[in-house]
Image: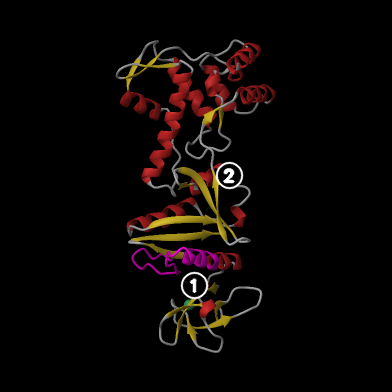
Amino acid sequence: MLMLVAKNGQGQLVYAWQSKPGRAYYCPECGQPLRLCVGTQKAAYFAHRRRSSCQLDQGESSQHLTGKHQMWQWANDHGWRPALEVYLPRIQQRPDLLLSAGPEKVAMEFQCSPLSFERLCQRNAGYQQLGLGFIWYLGPRYRHKLRAVKRAQFVQNYFGQPAIFLWDLNHCRPIYSRVAMTTAASSRLMIKQTYHLCYYPRAQVNLRQRVYQAGHLLNCCPLQAHCHAPTPFLMKESDFSWRINVLLWLEKMPLHYEWTQDKWWASIQRQTRWQSCPCLSTDSRRHFQTWQLQEFTQELLATYILGRNRSGYYLKQQPVWFENVSDKLNAITRHGE
Ligand SMILES: [Zn+2]
Protein backbone atom coordinates (compact mmCIF):
# COMPACT_ATOMS: atom_id res chain seq x y z
CA MET A 1 0.00 0.00 0.00
CA LEU A 2 0.98 3.60 -0.50
CA MET A 3 1.49 5.53 2.71
CA LEU A 4 1.86 9.17 3.55
CA VAL A 5 3.43 8.81 6.99
CA ALA A 6 6.63 7.05 8.08
CA LYS A 7 9.14 7.13 10.92
CA ASN A 8 12.55 8.66 10.23
CA GLY A 9 15.87 7.48 11.68
CA GLN A 10 15.15 9.40 14.90
CA GLY A 11 11.80 7.68 15.34
CA GLN A 12 9.80 10.82 14.51
CA LEU A 13 6.72 10.66 12.30
CA VAL A 14 7.22 12.49 9.01
CA TYR A 15 5.06 13.14 5.97
CA ALA A 16 6.10 11.88 2.56
CA TRP A 17 5.99 15.32 0.97
CA GLN A 18 8.42 16.67 3.58
CA SER A 19 10.87 13.77 3.24
CA LYS A 20 14.07 13.51 1.23
CA PRO A 21 15.11 10.62 -1.01
CA GLY A 22 18.19 8.73 0.10
CA ARG A 23 17.34 8.79 3.81
CA ALA A 24 16.06 5.86 5.84
CA TYR A 25 12.36 5.58 6.63
CA TYR A 26 10.49 2.91 8.54
CA CYS A 27 6.92 1.69 8.77
CA PRO A 28 5.23 2.98 11.95
CA GLU A 29 3.31 -0.28 12.21
CA CYS A 30 5.81 -3.10 11.54
CA GLY A 31 9.16 -1.24 11.61
CA GLN A 32 10.31 -2.52 8.21
CA PRO A 33 12.26 -0.11 6.00
CA LEU A 34 10.16 1.83 3.50
CA ARG A 35 10.85 3.20 0.07
CA LEU A 36 10.16 6.89 -0.57
CA CYS A 37 8.72 7.51 -4.01
CA VAL A 38 8.84 11.01 -5.38
CA GLY A 39 7.34 11.46 -8.82
CA THR A 40 6.54 14.51 -10.84
CA GLN A 41 2.95 13.47 -11.54
CA LYS A 42 1.81 12.07 -8.23
CA ALA A 43 2.20 13.22 -4.66
CA ALA A 44 5.13 11.63 -2.83
CA TYR A 45 4.42 8.46 -0.88
CA PHE A 46 6.06 5.64 1.05
CA ALA A 47 5.72 1.96 0.28
CA HIS A 48 6.94 -1.28 1.82
CA ARG A 49 10.04 -2.56 0.01
CA ARG A 50 8.61 -5.99 -0.49
CA ARG A 51 5.12 -7.37 -0.09
CA SER A 52 4.50 -7.91 3.59
CA SER A 53 1.73 -9.02 5.86
CA CYS A 54 1.87 -5.65 7.61
CA GLN A 55 -1.58 -4.19 8.31
CA LEU A 56 -0.56 -1.01 6.48
CA ASP A 57 0.52 -2.92 3.39
CA GLN A 58 -3.02 -3.71 2.25
CA GLY A 59 -4.02 -2.26 -1.11
CA GLU A 60 -4.90 1.39 -1.04
CA SER A 61 -5.80 3.28 -4.16
CA SER A 62 -3.82 6.28 -5.27
CA GLN A 63 -7.13 8.13 -5.34
CA HIS A 64 -7.49 7.59 -1.63
CA LEU A 65 -3.91 8.70 -1.09
CA THR A 66 -4.32 11.86 -3.14
CA GLY A 67 -7.55 12.70 -1.33
CA LYS A 68 -5.97 12.25 2.08
CA HIS A 69 -3.09 14.48 1.11
CA GLN A 70 -5.45 17.16 -0.19
CA MET A 71 -7.55 16.93 2.95
CA TRP A 72 -4.46 17.31 5.12
CA GLN A 73 -3.49 20.44 3.23
CA TRP A 74 -7.00 21.85 3.39
CA ALA A 75 -7.35 21.18 7.13
CA ASN A 76 -3.90 22.61 7.73
CA ASP A 77 -4.83 25.81 5.87
CA HIS A 78 -7.82 26.12 8.20
CA GLY A 79 -5.61 25.78 11.27
CA TRP A 80 -7.07 22.46 12.43
CA ARG A 81 -3.65 20.87 13.06
CA PRO A 82 -4.35 17.68 11.11
CA ALA A 83 -2.44 14.48 11.71
CA LEU A 84 -2.50 11.66 9.17
CA GLU A 85 -3.13 8.01 9.93
CA VAL A 86 -2.88 8.30 13.70
CA TYR A 87 -3.31 4.92 15.35
CA LEU A 88 -5.82 4.89 18.21
CA PRO A 89 -4.86 1.78 20.20
CA ARG A 90 -7.88 1.71 22.51
CA ILE A 91 -10.27 1.21 19.61
CA GLN A 92 -7.69 -0.24 17.19
CA GLN A 93 -8.63 2.24 14.49
CA ARG A 94 -6.63 4.49 12.27
CA PRO A 95 -8.69 7.42 10.96
CA ASP A 96 -7.40 9.00 7.75
CA LEU A 97 -6.98 12.31 9.56
CA LEU A 98 -7.29 13.48 13.12
CA LEU A 99 -8.08 17.17 13.49
CA SER A 100 -7.80 19.36 16.55
CA ALA A 101 -10.15 22.31 16.65
CA GLY A 102 -9.53 23.87 20.05
CA PRO A 103 -10.08 21.21 22.70
CA GLU A 104 -12.16 19.11 20.30
CA LYS A 105 -10.74 16.29 18.28
CA VAL A 106 -12.40 15.09 15.12
CA ALA A 107 -11.68 12.01 13.03
CA MET A 108 -11.97 12.65 9.31
CA GLU A 109 -12.44 9.81 6.87
CA PHE A 110 -12.15 9.75 3.11
CA GLN A 111 -14.19 6.83 1.83
CA CYS A 112 -13.39 5.71 -1.70
CA SER A 113 -14.15 2.01 -1.58
CA PRO A 114 -17.42 0.35 -0.57
CA LEU A 115 -17.99 0.08 3.15
CA SER A 116 -20.59 -2.11 4.80
CA PHE A 117 -23.19 -0.64 7.10
CA GLU A 118 -21.84 -2.72 10.00
CA ARG A 119 -18.25 -1.54 9.51
CA LEU A 120 -19.41 2.06 9.30
CA CYS A 121 -21.35 1.75 12.55
CA GLN A 122 -18.36 0.07 14.23
CA ARG A 123 -16.00 2.84 13.17
CA ASN A 124 -18.33 5.58 14.38
CA ALA A 125 -19.01 3.75 17.64
CA GLY A 126 -15.24 3.58 18.20
CA TYR A 127 -14.86 7.33 17.76
CA GLN A 128 -17.81 7.99 20.03
CA GLN A 129 -16.24 5.79 22.68
CA LEU A 130 -13.19 8.08 22.67
CA GLY A 131 -15.34 11.21 22.64
CA LEU A 132 -14.18 12.10 19.13
CA GLY A 133 -16.33 13.75 16.53
CA PHE A 134 -16.28 12.24 13.05
CA ILE A 135 -16.79 13.46 9.49
CA TRP A 136 -17.05 11.29 6.40
CA TYR A 137 -16.13 12.58 2.97
CA LEU A 138 -17.03 10.35 0.07
CA GLY A 139 -14.84 9.77 -2.96
CA PRO A 140 -15.66 10.04 -6.67
CA ARG A 141 -17.33 6.64 -6.93
CA TYR A 142 -20.10 7.91 -4.66
CA ARG A 143 -20.49 11.14 -6.61
CA HIS A 144 -23.24 10.28 -9.04
CA LYS A 145 -25.41 7.48 -7.89
CA LEU A 146 -26.11 7.21 -4.23
CA ARG A 147 -29.00 4.90 -3.54
CA ALA A 148 -31.43 5.78 -0.78
CA VAL A 149 -29.85 3.28 1.60
CA LYS A 150 -26.35 4.70 1.11
CA ARG A 151 -27.72 8.19 1.45
CA ALA A 152 -29.16 7.27 4.84
CA GLN A 153 -25.81 5.78 5.78
CA PHE A 154 -23.72 8.83 5.00
CA VAL A 155 -26.09 11.74 5.51
CA GLN A 156 -24.61 14.34 7.87
CA ASN A 157 -25.62 17.63 9.43
CA TYR A 158 -24.34 20.66 7.52
CA PHE A 159 -25.33 23.74 9.52
CA GLY A 160 -28.71 22.26 10.35
CA GLN A 161 -29.35 20.91 6.84
CA PRO A 162 -29.02 17.27 5.81
CA ALA A 163 -26.17 16.81 3.32
CA ILE A 164 -23.81 14.30 1.78
CA PHE A 165 -20.17 15.35 2.15
CA LEU A 166 -18.07 14.67 -0.94
CA TRP A 167 -14.42 15.34 -1.59
CA ASP A 168 -13.66 16.91 -4.98
CA LEU A 169 -10.25 15.58 -6.05
CA ASN A 170 -10.09 17.89 -9.06
CA HIS A 171 -10.44 21.07 -7.07
CA CYS A 172 -8.99 19.89 -3.73
CA ARG A 173 -12.05 20.90 -1.78
CA PRO A 174 -15.15 19.52 -0.10
CA ILE A 175 -18.60 19.63 -1.69
CA TYR A 176 -21.69 19.62 0.47
CA SER A 177 -24.53 18.13 -1.50
CA ARG A 178 -27.84 18.98 0.15
CA VAL A 179 -30.44 16.29 0.63
CA ALA A 180 -34.03 17.52 0.32
CA MET A 181 -36.35 17.39 3.29
CA THR A 182 -40.08 16.88 2.98
CA THR A 183 -42.33 19.69 1.68
CA ALA A 184 -45.85 19.86 0.29
CA ALA A 185 -46.17 19.41 -3.47
CA SER A 186 -47.22 22.27 -5.74
CA SER A 187 -50.42 21.82 -7.75
CA ARG A 188 -48.37 21.12 -10.83
CA LEU A 189 -46.47 18.34 -9.05
CA MET A 190 -49.70 16.87 -7.64
CA ILE A 191 -51.08 16.62 -11.18
CA LYS A 192 -47.89 15.05 -12.46
CA GLN A 193 -47.79 12.51 -9.64
CA THR A 194 -51.47 11.66 -10.10
CA TYR A 195 -50.94 10.98 -13.83
CA HIS A 196 -47.90 8.92 -12.94
CA LEU A 197 -49.95 6.80 -10.52
CA CYS A 198 -52.53 6.21 -13.27
CA TYR A 199 -50.02 5.36 -16.00
CA TYR A 200 -48.03 2.92 -13.89
CA PRO A 201 -50.69 0.84 -12.15
CA ARG A 202 -48.16 -1.79 -11.18
CA ALA A 203 -45.82 0.57 -9.38
CA GLN A 204 -46.03 0.60 -5.56
CA VAL A 205 -48.06 -2.62 -5.42
CA ASN A 206 -47.80 -3.06 -1.66
CA LEU A 207 -48.93 0.45 -0.96
CA ARG A 208 -51.79 0.10 -3.43
CA GLN A 209 -52.93 -3.06 -1.64
CA ARG A 210 -52.81 -1.45 1.78
CA VAL A 211 -54.87 1.48 0.49
CA TYR A 212 -57.29 -0.86 -1.29
CA GLN A 213 -57.88 -2.84 1.91
CA ALA A 214 -58.85 0.43 3.57
CA GLY A 215 -61.46 0.91 0.83
CA HIS A 216 -59.63 3.43 -1.37
CA LEU A 217 -57.64 3.76 -4.56
CA LEU A 218 -54.11 5.10 -4.42
CA ASN A 219 -54.66 7.24 -7.54
CA CYS A 220 -57.43 9.03 -5.63
CA CYS A 221 -55.40 9.72 -2.49
CA PRO A 222 -55.83 12.93 -0.46
CA LEU A 223 -53.86 15.93 -1.69
CA GLN A 224 -51.86 15.96 1.55
CA ALA A 225 -50.13 12.73 0.51
CA HIS A 226 -48.31 14.47 -2.35
CA CYS A 227 -44.89 15.84 -1.51
CA HIS A 228 -41.52 16.89 -2.81
CA ALA A 229 -39.15 14.24 -1.59
CA PRO A 230 -37.16 12.59 -4.31
CA THR A 231 -34.81 10.70 -2.04
CA PRO A 232 -35.82 9.66 1.42
CA PHE A 233 -33.14 9.09 4.02
CA LEU A 234 -34.94 9.50 7.31
CA MET A 235 -37.56 6.79 7.01
CA LYS A 236 -37.66 3.19 5.90
CA GLU A 237 -40.29 4.00 3.30
CA SER A 238 -40.88 6.85 0.90
CA ASP A 239 -42.29 10.09 2.17
CA PHE A 240 -45.38 9.51 0.02
CA SER A 241 -46.00 6.08 1.50
CA TRP A 242 -45.46 7.42 5.04
CA ARG A 243 -47.95 10.24 4.44
CA ILE A 244 -50.50 7.71 3.19
CA ASN A 245 -50.04 5.70 6.38
CA VAL A 246 -50.59 8.73 8.57
CA LEU A 247 -53.69 9.69 6.57
CA LEU A 248 -55.11 6.15 6.86
CA TRP A 249 -54.48 6.24 10.59
CA LEU A 250 -56.18 9.64 10.94
CA GLU A 251 -59.16 8.32 9.05
CA LYS A 252 -59.75 5.75 11.77
CA MET A 253 -59.93 8.43 14.46
CA PRO A 254 -63.34 9.87 15.37
CA LEU A 255 -64.00 13.43 14.26
CA HIS A 256 -62.95 16.04 16.88
CA TYR A 257 -60.65 13.55 18.56
CA GLU A 258 -58.16 15.49 20.70
CA TRP A 259 -54.46 15.03 21.32
CA THR A 260 -52.32 16.96 23.76
CA GLN A 261 -49.08 18.16 22.13
CA ASP A 262 -47.13 15.26 23.62
CA LYS A 263 -49.74 12.68 22.67
CA TRP A 264 -49.79 13.96 19.09
CA TRP A 265 -46.02 13.68 18.69
CA ALA A 266 -46.00 10.24 20.27
CA SER A 267 -48.87 9.03 18.03
CA ILE A 268 -47.42 10.29 14.80
CA GLN A 269 -44.03 8.82 15.82
CA ARG A 270 -45.72 5.44 16.11
CA GLN A 271 -46.75 5.67 12.44
CA THR A 272 -43.12 6.17 11.47
CA ARG A 273 -40.32 3.68 10.99
CA TRP A 274 -37.09 5.62 11.15
CA GLN A 275 -34.01 4.65 9.23
CA SER A 276 -30.84 4.49 11.30
CA CYS A 277 -28.44 7.15 10.08
CA PRO A 278 -25.09 6.22 11.65
CA CYS A 279 -23.29 9.42 10.62
CA LEU A 280 -25.77 11.64 12.44
CA SER A 281 -25.38 12.40 16.12
CA THR A 282 -28.37 11.69 18.36
CA ASP A 283 -29.14 15.41 18.44
CA SER A 284 -28.97 15.78 14.66
CA ARG A 285 -31.14 12.74 14.10
CA ARG A 286 -33.74 14.12 16.50
CA HIS A 287 -33.51 17.51 14.76
CA PHE A 288 -34.33 16.04 11.33
CA GLN A 289 -37.01 13.70 12.67
CA THR A 290 -38.75 16.58 14.45
CA TRP A 291 -38.46 18.62 11.25
CA GLN A 292 -40.20 15.86 9.28
CA LEU A 293 -43.06 15.49 11.76
CA GLN A 294 -43.50 19.24 12.23
CA GLU A 295 -43.55 19.93 8.51
CA PHE A 296 -46.37 17.46 7.89
CA THR A 297 -48.25 18.59 11.00
CA GLN A 298 -48.11 22.15 9.67
CA GLU A 299 -49.48 20.97 6.32
CA LEU A 300 -52.33 19.14 8.07
CA LEU A 301 -53.14 22.31 10.02
CA ALA A 302 -52.97 24.49 6.91
CA THR A 303 -55.38 22.20 5.02
CA TYR A 304 -57.83 21.97 7.97
CA ILE A 305 -57.39 18.27 8.67
CA LEU A 306 -56.09 19.24 12.08
CA GLY A 307 -57.22 22.09 14.23
CA ARG A 308 -55.55 23.62 17.24
CA ASN A 309 -57.05 23.90 20.69
CA ARG A 310 -55.68 24.95 24.06
CA SER A 311 -53.89 21.74 24.92
CA GLY A 312 -52.83 20.59 21.46
CA TYR A 313 -54.56 19.40 18.31
CA TYR A 314 -57.88 17.89 17.27
CA LEU A 315 -59.20 16.15 14.17
CA LYS A 316 -61.08 18.91 12.39
CA GLN A 317 -61.87 17.10 9.16
CA GLN A 318 -61.26 13.60 7.79
CA PRO A 319 -58.75 13.41 4.96
CA VAL A 320 -60.59 13.41 1.62
CA TRP A 321 -60.14 10.39 -0.64
CA PHE A 322 -61.62 11.09 -4.05
CA GLU A 323 -64.24 9.06 -5.88
CA ASN A 324 -62.34 9.21 -9.14
CA VAL A 325 -59.31 10.83 -10.73
CA SER A 326 -61.19 13.61 -12.49
CA ASP A 327 -62.71 14.79 -9.17
CA LYS A 328 -59.21 14.80 -7.79
CA LEU A 329 -57.77 16.79 -10.68
CA ASN A 330 -60.57 19.35 -10.26
CA ALA A 331 -59.79 19.64 -6.57
CA ILE A 332 -56.09 20.14 -7.35
CA THR A 333 -56.92 22.94 -9.76
CA ARG A 334 -59.15 24.63 -7.15
CA HIS A 335 -56.42 24.11 -4.55
CA GLY A 336 -53.93 25.93 -6.76
CA GLU A 337 -56.13 28.99 -7.26
ZN1 LIG B 1 4.57 -2.05 7.83
Residue carrying label 1: 56
- The stretch of residues the image draws in magenta is 69-95
- Near mark 2 (Cα within 10 A), the count class, few <14, some 14-19 or many ≥20, is few
Q: Earlier in the sequence, mark 1 or mark 2?
A: 1
Q: Is residue 26 above or below residue 71?
A: below
User: Which residue: 50% across, 53% down?
Assistant: 116
The residue at the point 40 percent across, 83 percent down is: 11
Looking at the rendered structure, the secondary structure element under dot 1 is helix
Disc on res. 133: none
Residue 83 in view in this figure: yes
Image coords of residue 267 (percent x, y): 37, 25
Frontmost residue, 337 versus 134 = 337
Residue 12, percent across and down? 41, 81
Tell me the quarter of the picture where residue 250 sits.
top left
| Residue matched to label 2 | 147
Q: Alpha carbon of mark 1 to alpha carbon of mark 2: how far?
A: 31 Å
Which residue is painted at 70% across and 24% down in the image? 199
Name the spot of residue 16 as percent of width and height, x first.
Answer: 53, 77
- Picture layout, residue 12 above or below residue 298: below
Left or right, residue 267 beside residue 96: left
